[in-house]
Amino acid sequence: MNRKGAEVLGYESAAALEGRDWFETAIRPDHRDHMRTVFHAVLAGDGASPHRYENEVITATGQVRLIEWRNTMLRDGDGRITGTLSSGTDVTERRAIEDELRRAEHRQRYLLALEASLRDAPTARDAVTAACKALGHELGAIFVGVGELQADEEHTVVQSEWRKADTIPSTIGRHHQPSAGAERFAAMLRGEIVTVRDVRTDPRTADIMAQEAYAAFGARASLDIPLMRAGKARALMFVADDQPRDWSFDDISIAQETLDRAWHAAERARAEAALANSESRLRAILDSLPIGVVLGEAPSGMITFANRATETIFGHPPIASPDTEAYREWESYHADGARVAGAEYPLAKVLQTGRPAEGDYHYRRGDGSMRWVRIAGAPIRDEHDQLIAGVVGIIDIDEQVRLLDHQRVLVAELSHRVKNVLAVVQAMALQTLSRAGSLEDFRAAFEGRLQALAAAHSLLLKSNWSSVSMQALVELVLAPFGSRGDTVSVCGEEFELSVRQGIALALILHELATNAVKYGALANSGARLEISWAIDKGCGRVELHWHERDLLSAPVMGSEGFGTRLIRRCVSNDLRGTATRQTGASFLTWQLVFPLETDGNPHIAKEIGRGERESVLP
């Protein structure tokens, strides 16, 4: 053996091996028979030369190293085999790297497949169930389940699990965790991973109730992974095997990664469901409006949405117009009787010019009847101020037009009636004067009769007001995001919004809540959302605060996006107010100030302008 061979075996030189049988000294006992077989094959001339194989050796320092051997046959001049030349290379580190690469590649394939299954899951429960199944197959386990920890920190609710066989009992439902091992459960609450090689011999699972629980599963080994958020356990993953098992670092690592990704997918699914529900509610709000609403995309003009009132007003289902030219299928006429061309409709004008447009049209309904409608449109722009759509509002003004026609008749009648009223007043005056003992008596009697006449006329006038509760509007908009009492607080004096204000504020609050789900208080555990408002009765203004605090990161103050522009435009154009935004290291605040419309708030209107100011407004 040369010096290099001796160094491979942990000796300083070949001389250190003199007098020793290196084969018996260095080769592991369970590998010796295999090496002898190889040597005999080489000497017998069997197979190709050189022979290659690997085995483990024990070095002089007691280390176990992996050696790659190459045995080459030696022949004399006549071609007879006279011996063998063996060379060895230490490949321990190389094989370790190769093994690690194989494990990493396998892990990456597993995680990619896991992400695909989580992405395809329609609900939060389906996402966690898919993760349980993937991990169960990966670890060769018999059971994987995830339970969400309840507020009492003693019970879990399991909604997702995977069982290798139907004979394994289901754990879906509510469970008292300390019953399955108080010490084990306490460790998980502290954020510790609990590995049990054999549940029959581990003292943490030795009590009778725990043994009965594991026996029902046929489990011999368990792995428990807590999911920690903000220093507290939020969920627990339970993995079971039917044989005693030493859980490896890779087992624990992949289980942790699976639980974390499953939880993120579940939260994402819940948020998306809340947003979809919010959009559905917004559509429901639009469908509940008494005016028609139609959306058309730019630049084509294709109709993408029409609410229920549109069908009611037009008397037929919305026409799926692919472009503005197709608007001619909506049959209507100008006041002079000329038919309206597709490009003459307000929605077409908005999409062509990017400016608001409106007009009155005599529309042919689905039943053939004709009614006057008023259509008013406005552009919708993105965060780059590019026109992306147009929207129109449609109201039935047929009765209004008829009333205007009737008014012309009434004007003539009014002239006649005014003369009659004057005659009545004159007669009242003369009769009163003739019977009055003095001017003071006349004044008192005449005023009383004149007021009685005015009251009689006022009974002919009626007014109907439509309004929405501020408190109800806030609760309605926030309800789809699944906000809890410990996350969101709402306070403010009850008052009524006009229809115009209610629609604008619903859009504003929806936009703020959507941003909060994606980036703010409704996306960060431990964050808070505070919504409050007050009425300045000194000047009749409303001050609304939207305050997100305890955020994990500071909100980005870049260029204003479409959502911010929408908020500012709604506040400015529809609320006739102002919007101010402030951000800090861990908070975001919006302040909206707008005038109170007193028509629907008579109890507040009486106090407007009295006393001192009740809030500090700019």
Image (cartoon, rainbow, N blue to C red):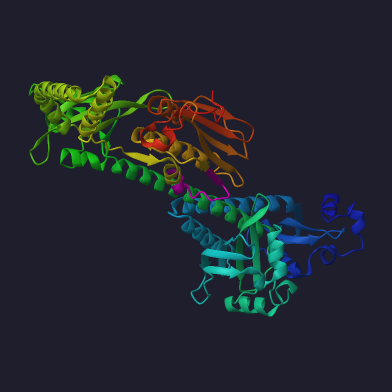
Taking the image as shown, residue 401 lies to the left or right of residue 575, namely: left
Q: Position of residue 460 (x, y in %)?
A: 20, 35
Taking the image as shown, residue 375 lies to the left or right of residue 116, namely: left
**Residue 5 is covered by the magenta coloring:** no
Foreground pick, 588 / 226: 588
Q: Position of residue 93 (x, y in %)?
A: 73, 50
In the depicted structure, whether residue 522 falls above or below residue 431: below
The total of numbered circles placed on residues is: 0
**Residue 484 is covered by the magenta coloring:** yes
Q: Position of residue 23 (x, y in %)?
A: 82, 64
* Residue 333 visible in rendering: no
Region of the chain picked out in magenta, as a range: 477-490
Q: Determine the residue positioned at 58% across, 55% down.
A: 258
Q: Determine the residue positioned at 42% across, 37% down.
A: 603
Q: Which image quadrant for residue 467?
A: top left
Taking the image as shown, residue 446 lies to the left or right of residue 2, namely: left
Q: Quadrant of the N terminus?
A: bottom right
In the depicted structure, whether residue 93 falls above or below residue 84: above
Foreground pick, 205 / 406: 406
In the depicted structure, whether residue 543 falls above or below residue 136: above
